[in-house]
Amino acid sequence: MSSEARERLLQYVSFNDAANEGVTPDQLVNDAISEALLNQPALRNCLIPGCFKQMDAISCMNGHKPPRPEWSGQGWRTLGSGTIFPAGGHICPDHVETVTDHLPRRLKLPSGRWSVECACSWTPTPQRWHGILRSMWEQHILTVTGKLPDAPPVTDPEHRTPLSDLTEADLADLYDRLWDAETDREETRQVARTCMTYYTSAVPALLGVQTSLEALRSRIVTDSRDWSSDKLDAWLWAVLVGLNCENTEAGHVHDDDCAGDQGLWDMARQHGIPTDQAIRTGQLRWWVANAIKVAKQIEEANPQ
Ligand SMILES: [Zn+2]
Ligand SMILES: [Zn+2]
Ligand SMILES: [Zn+2]
């Protein structure tokens, strides 16, 4: 290690001064230089475009005082990878709220292209290179904070570019959008097809179950037997007919004319059925009643 500045510095260090420290003048100067290098601030910028705040990552990490008070890391936040900042990003205290409201999540689309899902629900046109997402999000931030004018909608005839003004890049962008629309359409069709397959097999099954359950119910309620004295009979009645009032109309108050909400508990007490099994019986009843209710709704919506 040798340089003009170092030589000049050495001239100021007497042999005795160094000896008092137990080292040679050379070592004393070397130590000072390496310490200065080690403690160099490592400044990080706020990721919001146009913000000039900086913080010193070294003093912040070591818990030391920053070399300048304005480089303090207090109140700064960090964005991890998995966002559009692959190496992570730093946010100054002034912009924590903005970034929280517009937290950018990187999206890889089935078409293999990239987009951003902003916390505010903004999503840009998918791109082939993910590195461009950060700039697009920055433009979005500048727009929502009022520093850039709003982009005109592409479909607005007032803002349509005349055919003769379209460049090759414009056309490439339009074809990209077309490609996305085609991919979207194919995906939507597949989802619709899957839903239709399930619907066409589930609905007849549900309507059949409704028929069976209603047949069981009318068989039971028209039977002359006392369905409350035997434990199994009482349980069948509780599941297939129901012991509690099932009126779900808003404002309904149980009265002497309805079954009220104690029937199931009374039956459980009468037959020594434990609470958890009584609750389970209530659930089984709910599923039966709900299946019949949903089947009726489907029938009403699609009269045969
Ligand atoms: Zn900032
Ligand atoms: Zn946003
Ligand atoms: Zn009631």
Image: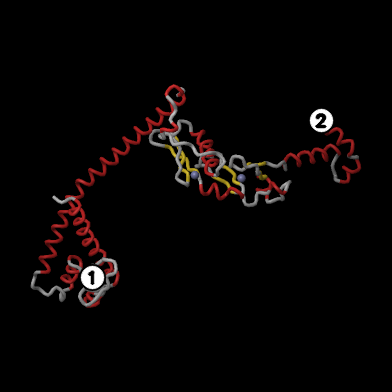
Displayed quadrant of residue 79: top right
Asked if the residues shown at circle 1 and circle 2 are in contact, with their CB atoms under 8 angstroms apart, the answer is no
Find residue 19 and report its horizontal and vertical position in percent.
88, 43
In the picture shown, does residue 268 fall above or below 98?
below
For disc 1, the marked residue is 245
Find residue 125 and report its horizontal and vertical position in percent.
44, 35
Find residue 66 and report its horizontal and vertical position in percent.
71, 48
In this rendering, position of residue 49 left or right of residue 170:
right
In the picture shown, does residue 166 fall above or below 75?
above
Residue type at tag 2:
Ser
Find residue 32 and report its horizontal and vertical position in percent.
80, 41
Q: Nearer the viewer, residue 216 or 135?
A: 135
Say which quadrant the N terminus sits in: top right
Residue at 29% x, 38% y is 190
Q: Residue farthest to the front? A: 158
Residue at 68% x, 49% y is 72
Q: Nearer the viewer, residue 95 or 77?
A: 95
**Mark drawn on residue 105:** none
Q: Residue farthest to the left? A: 224
Structure colour scheme: secondary structure
Q: Tag 1, which secondary structure?
A: loop
In the picture shown, does residue 29 fall above or below 281?
above
Mark 1: few/some/many CA within 10 Å (<14, 14-19, 20+): some
For disc 2, the marked residue is 3
Q: Tag 2, which secondary structure?
A: loop
Q: Is mark 1 within 8 Å of ligand 3?
A: yes
N-terminal label among 1 and 2: 2
